Structures are given as C-alpha cells and as structure tokens.
Amino acid sequence: MLDAILSFLPRAIAQGIPLLYGSTGEIITQKSGNMNLGIPGVMYVGGICGVIGAFVYEQSLASPTDLNPALAVLIPTLFCLIGSLLMGLLFCFLTVTLRANQNVTGLAMTTFGVGFGNFFGGSLVKLSGADMPFLALSATSNCFKKSLPIADKLGVFGDLVLSYSFLAYLAVIIALVAAFIINRTRTGLHLRAVGENPATADSAGINVNRYKYVATCVGCMIAGLGGLYYVMDYASGIWANDAFGDRGWLAIALVIFTIWRPNVGVLASFLFGGLYILHMYIPSGMNLAVKELYKMLPYVVTIIVLIISSLRNQRDKQPPQSLGLPYFREDR
C-alpha cells in the first residue's frame, strides 16, 4: 500500500504541473476581464513551438555530443514563449481591438492551436525520417528533466519533494508570485479593477486596453510553458499528435475550482493531477465503463465546487463581473 502511494504522489504532481501553468495563466487573463477559452490551443502551440526549437537546435549539431545543455533548454523555451505570445496577441487583437466575441474567438483558437500543432508535428516527423508516427527529442528532454543531485540520497523526502525538474518548481513560483501581485500590489489592484468594472477603471485613469493586452499575453506565455513541460519533461521529449489530451480544458476547470486564486491552484493542480490518473490505481478489473467514470472525477469535483460557491454567493468567490464582456469606452 505504501509503495502504491509513493508511486502515485510523484506522478500526480507531475501530472498537475501542466494544469498549474494553464490555470495560472488563465486566472491572470480572466482577472483582466478576458475569458480565453483558447488556453488548450495555446498550450498546444507552446508545446509544438518548443519541439520546433529543440528539433532545429539538434539538427544543427554535427554530433549529439556537441549539445550544450544551456542552449538545449533556452532555445525551446524561447520558441515556446514566442509562439504563446503570438497566440495571446492574436486573441487580444480580435477581442479587445476588434471586440469580437470572446467565447467564439477562444474556441476558434483552440481548434487553430491543435491544427497548428498537428501540422508541424507531422511535418517534423517526416523530416526526421522516423518510422514511427512520433518524434523523439531525448537529448533535449534529458536537459529539461534534470533534478537536484541530492534527491536520490534523501529517501522518501527526496522522491516526493526534490525529484522534479526546474520547470515544476518554476510553475509553483509563478503561481505564488502571481497571487502576490494580484492581491498585494497596485498593479494587481488595477488589474482587478479592469476586470470588475472597466468603465470605472477607465475614469480613474487606468489604461484598460493595455492591462487587458498585457495580462492576456503574459497569461498565454505562462500557459504555453505548460505545453512545453508536458512534452519535454512528462512525455520525455516525445511528440505525438493529439497526445496532449484534454489537459487544457482541465486547466480551465481548475480556474473555477480554485475560485480565481493562483496560490490555491498549487495544491489544487496536484489534486486534479491525482484525480486524472486515479483510474490507473483503483482496481476495476476489465470493466472499462468504471474506468471511464473515474476519469470524470476532476470535472465532477469542479461542478460541485461551482454549485457550492454559487449558493454561498460571496463576492470574493465569484468571477470578475465584466468577465467575457467587451468594453466600449463610448458607453460609459
């Protein structure tokens, strides 16, 4: 039993890291009043852009031994951030500048992001000459997956706390810093004001469009890192089309579960990661229907939390009042 728990917890945490990146980015975005349902597509684009960067770098080497660990990490990360930033700029241009419907735009960006990833992923598989329908970037992945050297010497504590890559710890740091900025700084106050009542914020001299642009683009870049982590760390550098699954939608569900609080998202993402893989650890025999029911647990828990928070009707547990609504300055 203890061995099963020790095996389950690290996998749950690793599974939750992409969700933490996605939910943190979406919380920052929604705090500005923008509802970006394109987060699944953004995470997909972040993952494939990192793969493109890693592929270009590995192909430029005369020998695999020439690989520079710093560049192997920096180049894919930079590609990932640029790709995610462009997705954020596209969403803002359509919804903030052109005032297109945010829900429709987000869903369109999810479809676009998945198609973008599948197209370039399939192209890279063909360029690599691989016989299998996936691309393996093991050398780059090994650089991303390096953990603290003392983890193996500290037993259970090392396995549960210190055995993860730098991107895992970075996700926690970003979530905590985001929570501090949102709740404890003037910038966060302005951001929340824009999301709650952009007309009032505008009349107070706050540049509403600038805050929406910056928050959405930063949120997309953070979410894109979730895609990069999944490919380079969790999947060991293996890219396969449509392998990302529904993690982007789980990240959006996690926003509701955490009641728009990035710091709560740290533990909540690990809980969701555990619920996501729980069906692998609960005996169900050959009954596939039962396993599918277990896979519904993260969404069922989210619905329950949404119902409870709606019944309590506390203002601090509700989404921003102007979430998803376009702002027309002429109407104020």
Image: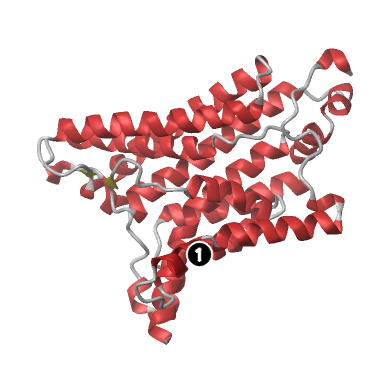
Instruction: Report the colour scheme.
Output: secondary structure
Query: Residue 103, image x and y in percent?
Result: 63, 31
| Residue nearer the viewer, 291 or 255 | 291
Image height of 95 relative to 53, above or below: above
**Image x and y of residue 72, in percent:** 28, 42
Residue type at numbered disc 1: Leu
Q: Residue at 15%, 42% (x, y): give it.
A: 66
Q: Secondary structure at mark 1?
A: helix
Q: Please state, as top left, top right, bottom left or bottom right, where the C terminus lies in the image.
A: top right
Residue 125 image point, x, y percent: 20, 36
Q: Residues within 10 Å of mark 1 (few under 14, many from 20)?
A: few
Q: Position of residue 278 (x, y in %)?
A: 46, 69
Reading the image, the residue beneath label 1 is: 293
Q: Report the side of 323 relative to 294 (left or right).
A: right
Q: Specify the quadrant of the image occupied by residue 257.
A: bottom right
Q: In this orientation, which residue lies closer to the viewer: 46 or 77? A: 46
